[in-house]
Image (tube, helix red, strand yellow):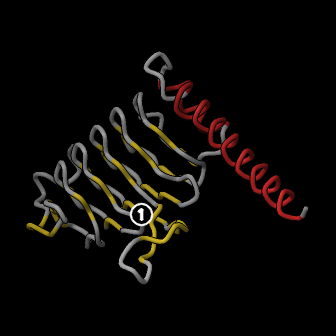
Amino acid sequence: MLYPRRMLAALLRALRLDGAIAVRHLVLTVLAGSALTPRPLRFAVYRLAGLDVRTPNIFSGTRITGTDLHIGRGTFLNHDCYLDVARGRVDIGERCHLGPQVMILTATHDRDGAGGATSESRYLTTVVGDRVWLGARATLLPGVVVGDGCVVAAGAVVASDCAPGGVYGGVPARRLREVDDATSGHA
């Protein structure tokens, strides 16, 4: 008799979690992320939903999976960005430029003893410093820190921290050179 009670409790926990995910998706992605929603209204919805968003420059299609998010003043997110903050945290600094379809991830899995992944997720904080430029379809993996003034090339996969002031590219991304004054701060 105890077994069915545990199953019912697990089912109710799953339903609560899935319901919260559905509501966040409806408000943050379907409503706020719609191309029919003007940026000032999108900004207001994000703020009312508890997001620490300090810029109205977030274009349509952006998917935000939770609420532990900070986006600094003067930052620009192009269309269709994905911010994985379901249970992790994303911090994006001031005056950054994110190209279309940039992905910033926080969820990861540890390895099990057999060489596979464990079923339990771990959630990390992923940080983008000030004045960072992330090219189209760049991906930041969970827990990385992109230092101030960096440029990350389109399509790059950032798997480890990026020291400030560098141009990074490739899969996995590596430092290619220093940012010169002619390119810093431009998107």
126 to the left or right of 149: right
* Residue at the far right in the pictured view: 1
Quick one: quadrant of the N terminus? bottom right
| Residue 30 sits above or below residue 122 on the image | above
| Residue 56 sits above or below residue 178 on the image | above
Q: Residue at x 21, y 67 (%)?
A: 165
Q: Residue at x 54, y 61 (%)?
A: 88
Where is residue 39 shown, x and y percent of the image?
Answer: 47, 26
Task: Between residue 145 and residue 97, name the one nearer to us.
Answer: 145
Total tally of numbered discs in the picture:
1
* Residue at the far top in the pictured view: 36
Where is residue 29 shown, x and y percent of the image?
Answer: 52, 32
Where is residue 145 shown, x and y percent of the image?
Answer: 36, 68
Q: Residue at x 56, y 52 (%)?
A: 86
Task: Between residue 17 and residue 39, name the one nearer to us.
Answer: 17
Instruction: Find numbered disc 1 in the image and state the secondary structure of the residue it sits on.
Output: strand
* Residue at the far bottom in the pictured view: 113
Q: According to the image, label 1 marks what residue?
A: 127
